[in-house]
Image: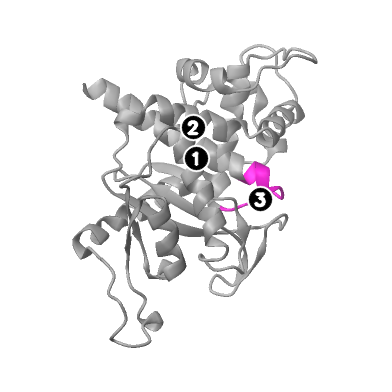
Amino acid sequence: MFVVLDKDTIVEEIIPHLPKRKRGFKPKSPISEIINCILYKLKTGIQWTLLPMEQLFSEVVPSYKTVFGHYRKWCEEGAWQTCWVEILKKNKSKIDCSSCDFDGSQTPAKKGGEQVGYQARKKAKTTNSLFLSDRQGLMLAMSQPISGEHHDLYNIKTHFQEITSILKKAEISTEGLFVNFDAGFDSENLRKITASEGIIANICENKRNQKSPSETEHYFDKKLYKERYVIERSNAWMDSFRSVLNRFDTTVSSWIGFNYLAFIVLGLRKFKQKRKSR
């Protein structure tokens, strides 16, 4: 049987954080195998209708529609984000927030859908989201997706606070957090937003924004900014999951769900490695 995460990890780390069903029929197949099937879809990007159900289930083999139904229900309930927050909370000591990295990511949206727009640079319809990673390259949080025609600073206050709210839910303080931003995020508005959260913003200056040499100089640490390659590596790790490499989901909730599932898989693998090394 193909596994992305072993059964014990799914049972101990994921299932306890999923909503408990008080009504309806109890699934005939183990929840752990349903989740493993969803993770197979995440990893391979295969169409729901083509899932190799007989290879993914040990006893009762459900319809792919049953697995899809469970996934959609959990997405609508925000279960994957909640699960990730609880995992972060439990493993705070294994996260390295001595320096964090912030970046935007444009993902081609092959079937259109919610929050999809034409992005001239990509010459395609895309969805744009903002991501925050720690110094190890572990993705910590993402913003709500917006359509691809918008730049990274579009409605930045709302989207930045979406990310910091996830950290706060996981009981990770933003006070004194050092965050690298590329030149695309060079704006006085963002500097004020980060300062209000107690965050030290290390923003690479955008030369096009400099109207005169007499303008106030901002703090910028070139040496620490060079460490920003870490989030580019994180994006490559995320792209190893075919369901987030390209967006085929037409609903935003499903798209967010797959991203948080990728966070969960990468995070649990890293936390498990740290436990073994002790």
Amino acid type shown at disc 3: Phe
Q: Earlier in the sequence, mark 3 or mark 1?
A: 1
Residue depicted at 41% across the width and 50% down the height: 197
Q: Mark 2, mark 3: which one is toward the viewer? A: 2
Q: Earlier in the sequence, mark 2 or mark 1?
A: 2
What's the mark number on residue 166? 1
Callout 1 crowding tier (Cα within 10 Å): few <14, some 14–19, many ≥20: many
Asked if the magenta segment contains residue 250, the reply would be yes
Q: Using the image, determine if residue 134 lies above or below residue 183.
A: above
Asked if the magenta segment contains residue 244, the reply would be no
Answer whether residue 32 is visible to the viewer in this image: yes
Circles 2 and 3, Cβ within 8 Å, touching? The answer is: no
Q: Residue 113's spot in the image, x, y percent?
A: 73, 55
Circles 2 and 1, Cβ within 8 Å, touching? The answer is: yes
- Side of 236 relative to 74 (left or right): left
Which part of the image, by quadrant, shows the C terminus? top left
- Side of 220 relative to 169 (left or right): left
Q: CA distance from mark 2 to mark 1?
A: 7 Å
